[in-house]
Amino acid sequence: MPTPPRSPRSTAAPHAPPARPSPRASPRATAPPPPRDRRRKPRWGMRVVTTLSVVVLASAGIGHAVMTSLDADIARVDPFKDMKNRPQAGHGMNVLLVGTDGREEISKEQRRKYRLGGEPCHCTDTIMIVHVSEDRERASVVSLPRDSYAMTPAHVDRTTGKRHGSHPVKLNAAYAEGGPQLTVRTVESMTKVKIDHYLEVDFTSFMRTVDVVGGVQICTAAPLRDSYTGLNLPAGRHTLAGGQALQYVRARHLDGASDLGRMKRQQRFMAALVERITSSGILLNPMKFRDVTRAVLGSVRADKGFGTEEMLDLGRAMRNFSPSSSEFTTVPIGRMEFAVQGVGSTLKWDPVKAERLFHALREDRPLSVRRPHSEARIVPVAPQQIRVQVENGTGTPGLGRRVDAALASTGFRTTRAPVNAAASDVKRTIVAYDPRWDRSAKSLAAALPGSELRPVKGLGGTLKVIAGTDFERVRKVRADGPGQGESGVVRGDEVACS
């Protein structure tokens, strides 16, 4: 069973008997049906945004009656049942936010317009740890990529009933095999962070939530076009309604950053949502507060210890919360395409940097720091998100290795296996790229002064650098948003529109 946070200021209540679910909530209280299709599909990962809104909206403190009347809408789940040997509790509160696929309440017209084809798989593709500091003045959001390499603890498969020993999986597969309980156990095993509360959000309420707050404003320095989701945004400032916001947070085919780039856009959106809620007067309008909260709670499952009192107490403690009070990051990745037999290509965490990150959560310390001015050139895509194959296009021995090492030291994810090009008389260094990854190509070319951009259809997500005799150096570059360097931590006020 879950234990309350160690912090004396924690608002988590002792374990009260589970409330009798309402008829509406009871179907959700049972384990969801087994996944119909575990193939990778582009999903939108922002189901959790609506749950974060509950915490912010509760800060209005407009009355116990409003929240109590809505408590019945929350279906209950027990992800901590019979759990043993859990990590030691730290200070503050750690909430595991899980987004599951579900589109039953989205109309056929909306599915067509926003390209939501296919059947719901009742699986998870978004996992985040939200750490609320002991003093309730800071929230740290850590995204755990769905394709992270993970080792599940021993468990019983909820679909087949078969007993499994510990084995490797992609992190999102833990939910398919063992539901919320195995997901919590796997995350705690990987992070050594004790989870105090569990919130599971279905994305069907996402568009309603965005619409009821009057839309959310985002800014983009470059055009964003994704043929899979239908997203088509010119550079500039935009106020996104529910459907367009859904396209924005789903998009993962804008460039080679794929899921990692999508998570950064999700973080930008979360910061913008906090800005919208805290600056629009919603918290001071009881009727609007009620409407937004109803939209939020329509598809939430939570552990039995996270109820009306906890939401109100936490909300009252965070009345002065603002975008600058939030910080966002993704677990540092050590290997982008870590192949595992029977599992496929996974993302393997950097053990040293990941431990440093989770240690900060356990110690209730901020993740972000004020960064000194950098002389690096600003580019649209961070070098850490760009994969590169280097070829030596000259007769100079060792040039390929030199270029590969220089790019890697600047942050680019090179293959570390340079080869000789078909031609050995290349004078001007070439950056070859698939047109779908044009933003990544521009970022790479900026690091290679004087290089030539050459589109090659069908090349894929790995860009190619053919080193010519003109190569002299690799210039330092960083992404257009702050905090996109090695630490990858940004505050909400840094990514929201200024």
Image (cartoon, helix red, strand yellow):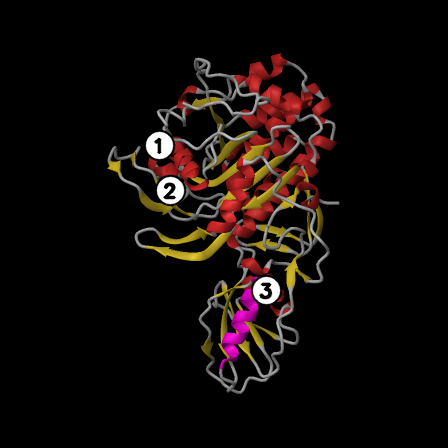
Q: Is residue 273 visible?
A: yes
Q: Which mark is residue 173?
A: 2
Is residue 401 found inside the magenta-colored segment of the image? yes
Displayed quadrant of residue 471: bottom right
What's the residue type where badge 2 is placed? Ala
Which residue shows up at 34% across the image and 51% down it?
343
- Between circles 2 and 1, the one closer to the viewer is 2
Q: Dot 1 corresponds to which residue?
A: 33
Q: Which residue is rendered at x = 60% and y = 31% of the image?
A: 133
Disc 1 element = loop
Helix, strand or loop under label 2: helix
Q: Residue at x 51, y 54 (%)?
A: 258
User: Compared to 317, does 389 lie above or below?
Assistant: below
Residue found at x 24% / y 35%: 162
Query: Secondary structure beneath disc 3?
Result: loop
Graded by Cα atoms within 10 Å as few (under 14), some (14 to 19) or many (20 or more), the crowding at tag 2 reads many
155 displayed left or right of 46: left
Residue position marked by numbered label 3 in the rendering = 410
State the CA–CA distance, disc 3 to disc 2.
34 Å
Dot 1: within a 10 Å radius of its alpha carbon, few (fewer than 14), some, or many (20 or more) residues?
A: few
Q: Earlier in the sequence, mark 2 or mark 1?
A: 1
The extreme left residue here reads: 162
Q: In which quarter of the view is residue 245 placed?
A: top right
